[in-house]
Amino acid sequence: MSNTTIRHQVMWNRLITIVEEQAQTLVRTGFSVSTREAGDVSAGVFDLQGRMLAQAVTGTPGHINSMALSVAHFLDKFPIETMNDGDVFITNDPWKGTGHLPDIVVVSPTFRGGKIVALFASTTHVVDIGGLGMAPDGKQIYHEGLFIPLMRLSKAGEINETLMDFVHANCRESMQVEGDIHALAGCNEVGGRRLVAMMDQYGLNDLDALAETIIESTRSAMRAAIAKLPKTKVHNTMTTDGYDREITLKASFVVEGDTVVVDFDGTSPISDFGINVPKCYTEAYTSFGVKCVIAPEVPNNAGSLAHIVVRAPEGCIVNAPHPCAVVARSSVGHMLPDVVFGCLHQLMPDKVPAEGTSGLWNLKLGAGHGITARDPEADAARATFTATSFHSGGAGARPTKDGLSATPFPSGVRNVPCEVLETVCPLVVWKKELRRDSGGPGKYRGGLGQTMVLGNREKAEFAIFATFERVKNPARGRDGGKPGANGSLELESGTKMRGMGRQVVPIGDRLVVHMPGGGGIGDPATRDREAIATDIKAGYVSAEAAARDYGAAIDNAD
């Protein structure tokens, strides 16, 4: 191994630490719960061609992989030669950013000795961007809040106060949103400083040679992984709940030369509601699904992403054009890795998990004038709020292990502690527990969902902006494994609620959320009897379900 190769490996490792510090800076300085608690962010460093060289481990695939595409749009609008030290750029354009208006992308050039050497980009999901809020009830992007086109957040170090005034005037939680925007710019600055220090230490005038080494070595590793795949074309279809009608997600998977091609031809057309998916987000989660199985150890950057081609007819729900409503694009987008896994299972049957909840079961909550009919005796200031708390059902069983319970896959965001939600709004979480019998039976059991019960400590109504999947169509098992439990939403008084759309919880009532479970793998009759006994003792499976689903009567579970 040459000295140059060793130096480049050391510098590659250094880049990883730089972008991880960039992401952690964003988490530590962010204002919104989604940023500081859930980690719904991304961070990365790019060369001057707009190619992502390295990404932080902290972050979600939807943000990371769509951010990887977004920097090219910034360069089209603001060529490298027009950038100055202290410039910062911003957008939340769903088709040029990361898929919906609540996600803000900030890009900052890094200069060394008066010369631009790299770009840092970061994203986060803000708590509010105006419009109808996080409800998927809107019919066009114009209903969904403040649209920030590609523009300067600052010029030569001077903040764009006009933009910040627009943000302040259009957001219900403007302090949190403005704070997150400053955190995005600040984390990019930290990344830039660390990169300059690295370049000073190693005497680099530019990143050209290092970038080529990173990209080409990654492409070589990706080509080697793809070469091992069968050349058979396979197909998979999934049915999901949708907003007002069920959705068909259909995909084909084939290897063409040194490239994987995933084509969503045959997928349902766009919806009249806000569950449509811009193609950048489709590409992000499709690519993630492919890499998870065929090349999990290969770095995720422009080199590996170049070997995954995603096709989708314009006008289908996973390639929705402007001005479609897209605020809840994750409801459909998070299903795409499972659609890809269904294809890959036919080629690599021992490598693919069963379907999971996949779509997040975030509690998007709010109250106030026009959202709820506020009780006249309630304290208006205390009864009005906007909040999002991140939660998830169960993941699918793994090829040789049970599925993870209450774990958000594929997004990877963190569940938000009850105490945090209770701090930022007037709600009380009366119950949060794993949901018994929700994991799909199998040789390997699906992960369990959760049950949560929430109420308002004020004498006031509150609303939930529901964007939930797996209410009608549960996560399917594989190889004889059974589906996970369906999710449901209801009032404690007994009223059933819809999985999609804004709905109000009346004064004095409580919201009950049953999150879905993941599918199982393998014939339940072959499950280890000791594992069943352990599940019963832990409260994961009831004795009745064990007898019904596994044919097991466990006498000494206690």
Image: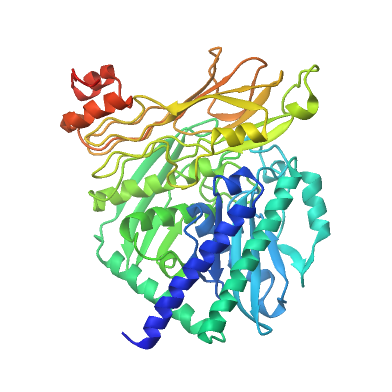
Question: Residue 443 location in percent, x, y?
Answer: 21, 35
Total marks placed: 0
Q: Quadrant of residue 154?
A: bottom right
Asked which quadrant contains residue 29, the reply is bottom right
Nearest the eye: 459 or 264: 459
**Residue 145 picture quarter:** top right
Q: In the rendered view of the protein, which quadrant contains the N terminus?
A: bottom left
Query: Is residue 48 visible in the rendered structure shown here?
Result: no
Q: Is residue 469 above or below residue 353?
A: above
> Residue 3 in the image: x percent, y percent?
37, 87
Task: Give the answer, above or below, for where 157 lies relative to 416.
Answer: below
Residue at image location 41% in from the left, 31% down from the top: 449
User: Along the horizontal axis of the image, is 253 left or right of 419?
Assistant: left
Q: Which residue: 60% across, 25% down?
A: 428
Query: Split into 4 quadrants, where in the image is the C terminus?
Result: top left
* Nearer to us in this view, 155 or 66: 155
Kindly give the residue lying farthest to the top in the view shown: 493
Q: Is residue 378 left or right of residue 251?
A: right
Image x and y of residue 248, in percent: 43, 39
Q: Between residue 476 and residue 511, name the one nearer to us.
A: 511
